[in-house]
Amino acid sequence: MEVLLKVEKLSKHFKVRRTLSDMRQNTPKTIKAVDNVSFEVHRGETLGLVGESGCGKTTTTKVILGLMKPDSGRVLFEGDDVHGKLPKPKYSQIHRDIQAVFQDPAGSLDPRMTIGQITREPLEIHRIGTPASREETAKKILDAVGLTVEQYERYPHELSGGQQQRVAIARALALHPKIVILDEPVSALDMSVRTQILNLLKDLQSEFGLTYVSVAHDLGVIRYMCNHVAVMYLGQIVENCATSELYENPIHPYTRALLEAVPVPDPSVRRVARDYLRGSMPSPISLPTGCRFHTRCPHAIDICRIVEPQLLEVTKGHLASCHLADTFAQKAMAS
Amino acid sequence: MQDLSVRFYLASGVVNAVENLSFNVRKGVGFGIVGESGSGKTVTALTIMGLLARPPGRIDSGKILYNGTNLLTTSQEDMRRLRGKSIAMVYQDPMTSLNPVLRVCFQIAEALMVHEKISQHEAEARAVELMSAVGIPDAEKRAKEYPHQFSGGMRQRIMIAMALATKPDLLIADEPTTALDVITQSQILALLEDLQRKHDMTVILVTHDLGIVAQLCDEALVMYAGHGMELNTVKDIFSHSKHPYTRGLLESTTRVDKEISRLSSIPGNIPDMIDPPTGCRFHPRCPLADNRCARQEPPAFLQVSGGYSKCWRSEPT
Amino acid sequence: MTDTSSASRPYPARAATFWRSYSRSRGAVFAFFFLVALISAAVLADYLFPGDVEAPDMSRIMLPPSFSAVLGTDHLGRDQLTMLVFGARTSLIVAFSAGGLLAVVGTIAGLLAGYFGGKVDGLMMRIADVFLTIPILPLILVIVSLTGPSLLNVMFAIGLTSWPVMARVVRSDSLALMKREFIEIERVMGASSRRIVFKHLLPNQLNSVLVYTSLSIPVVILTEASLEFLGLTPLSVSWGFMLNVAMNYWIRGTWWMSFFPGLAIFATALAFYFVSEGLKEALNPKLKRRRESLVAQIAERKK
């Protein structure tokens, strides 16, 4: 399977105001929102980017979408550097091929435009077809996402959250993109609607041959949607492997902690609520030395404090960034 | 709670927030109220606490019996005394529930000083104790700090400390962990479970997360569009629920522990609360609905366990 | 609501919906008709009151309101009503033109600052600050001394000194909008800057732009009136000038000479304010469907 999107050693820093004492002590204050992140997305698959808030997953998507420029590293789409100097038609093509659906259903729709206008917008931007044909295409796509013709004339605020998100999806698909970045597409929706939208996304994926990058903090959603997962912590990828691998044989202690922490909707599986992790997430401004996770890791040893671990292949197709990765991998195999 | 009905009277219409809701919570039990937005779960919690905004809200019928007293007929004065002393509440957003300009130990101490006749000094000392009881490290030092100096999880712990200061018999927690990340959430839930057991406290947990209900609660009430659809022990609800809405929710919940190729989803949308569907509120979305469901609202059919299910399909034959 | 594509919806239908929402505010309706009447009177002034307005008639000086002179006469015997109507012309011309000037310049500056941010924003705001510090009186004096007093100068001076405030309002709205997700999606889709600014930033601020413009018009009218009051312009037939003259005569008890021009200024300013209220209602698609949004609010509160 070919690689559609490749993120190569991507870094994005944000400068933070320094106080006088900072400047005197010469402490640089940058937030390393994304630090040396690399991963690949193959055509037709769904890659999940998981992590808690502040881990850098949203910043990564913004760089992929071209909304922010990276400080180092590249984003390659079908081999072309998204932020590089591209000829105009290529540039235009990339804007058609990479689309996005964001978290807040109402916020991603212009409140002054009707649903029809919103759906036609991408077609108008790229000057595709005539006004009449655009209307037809828009109506077809709205139908494909489960909205009725009657809603064509409505305004976003007249629709429910789930319906609004369907419009956002329709708009993203209007140009027949190759890859859609989904940034928490269902976290703002009610439970009964969530699954509707997830199923819709899955169906559309097979119908239109799409590739997804799904960013979420909900591990259940990730397991359902994705076939490959990358776990992020404080700006770095700490684990990257196939979905089933991640949930059945997690290697990195952070991943394991996350999985243990999710309450399972089955009272017979009553988890012993262990206080697995110590402390809380460090501030991204003053990152821990060595492995960023060592301050909370129950297994941390001396080397973890000093040397930053690399993201290496521990077992086939399974990457993890931990000094004790091999030990954990063997334990996981054994159990 | 017996037959509670709460409506909001607005210029544009009447919102039937809660209708004919009844349930009992025994002492020491972890009771969950599950529902999505518009289900009426938060309104129910606020009504118990007497914090319902009226107008435009109005309690049109019902009784809430707490240890024999009807909370709905108690005076404001008495309610205030009950609130904070025997019934406490923890809210969803720890950021806006704490006063940003007061030190945290003072805020916790305040609850104590209002309800017990002790000095500020003594109250603040108790506050520090409470802070370490809820798992805040370095409580002595941190007590002098302000809310913004704490993380979200810590703030929620402070809220819990405030709620528990007066050793209440009943704690109502409204979505206490929704704003927190999953690891902090598990810590807070573990804390709540510990405290509940230690103090033999009754906890009413309002949430939309079925996982939390399964892990923390003994009994649960499932609400939809202002109605109590199913009430039962948590074991029964999760293994053989009698109500199609509950079953629909369970079947559409994503899982971390199982691989699922396709989840079934509940079609349709949450109804308009000003103009809800006739008969059973869930019937437009229910796979088992028939004509009777559309015309007549089903009564709550009692179940063997003592709970009920508000569905024609659970009618005992 | 019938299913019609907005592209083919006839103008009368859209106008009808617009009016319905606009008329939600009763003040706005009165104000609208008042202004229509005022504008018509000003336009048709020559036909309504033939003859030379400024011609004195010393036989009728300083007559209180009566049947023959409904609003009284001034110190030169001229009928106040006539004077007011002609004065309306001046005030309205200045109001609309200066108001329009400050709206256009201010909005464009604000949009550019908000959309591009960074250095462009910094530059724009420094320029705006410079203009903000220019006091109108000395400015007008300078202009008048250079090119002589004229209506154009007044317009120009007022516009130049008032656009920065409008720019600030538009800029802050734009900056906030730029962070909204729907604008980000536009950029993801590859929309041009021009499209984003004019099709998305501006329409979502029409509310504040129009409201602020209609709020500045009264200020413009008052400023213009005070300039005339101080005698810095040559316009003898204007409300401000009438007030100027009235000042000299009030001691003789000629209350009508100051009352009516003052009332006219006040009423017109107020009318523009109410019009802005009506426009706010009419232009907000959310308020058009109040019922649904209220339900959503309740749902939000109940969660």
Image (cartoon, rainbow, N blue to C red):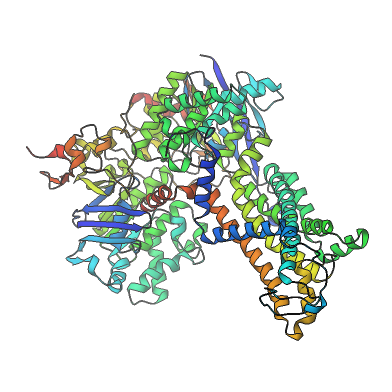
* Percent x, y of residue A58: 54, 37
Residue at 40% in and 29% down: A146
* Percent x, y of residue B200: 23, 58
Q: Is residue A6 visible?
A: no
* Percent x, y of residue C255: 70, 80
- When asked about the image quadrant of residue A263, the answer is top left
* Percent x, y of residue A227: 43, 23
Q: Residue furthest left?
A: B317
Which is nearer the eye, A103 or A54?
A103
Q: Is residue A36 left or right of residue B223?
A: right
Which is nearer the eye, A161 or A249?
A161
Which is nearer the eye, C136 or C201?
C136
Q: Is residue C124 left or right of residue A318?
A: right
- When asked about the image quadrant of residue C221, the answer is bottom right
Q: Is residue B11 left or right of residue C130?
A: left
Position of the N terminus of chain C by quadrant: top left
Q: Is residue B247 left or right of residue A145?
A: left
Residue at 27% in and 66% down: B86
- When asked about the image quadrant of residue C240, the answer is bottom right
Q: Residue furthest bottom?
A: C252
Which is nearer the eye, A276 or A72?
A72
Rendered position, C70 above or below B35: below
Q: Is residue B120 visible?
A: yes
Q: Residue furthest top?
A: A1
Rendered position, A323 above or below B160: above
Residue at 76% in and 64% down: C224
Image label count: 0
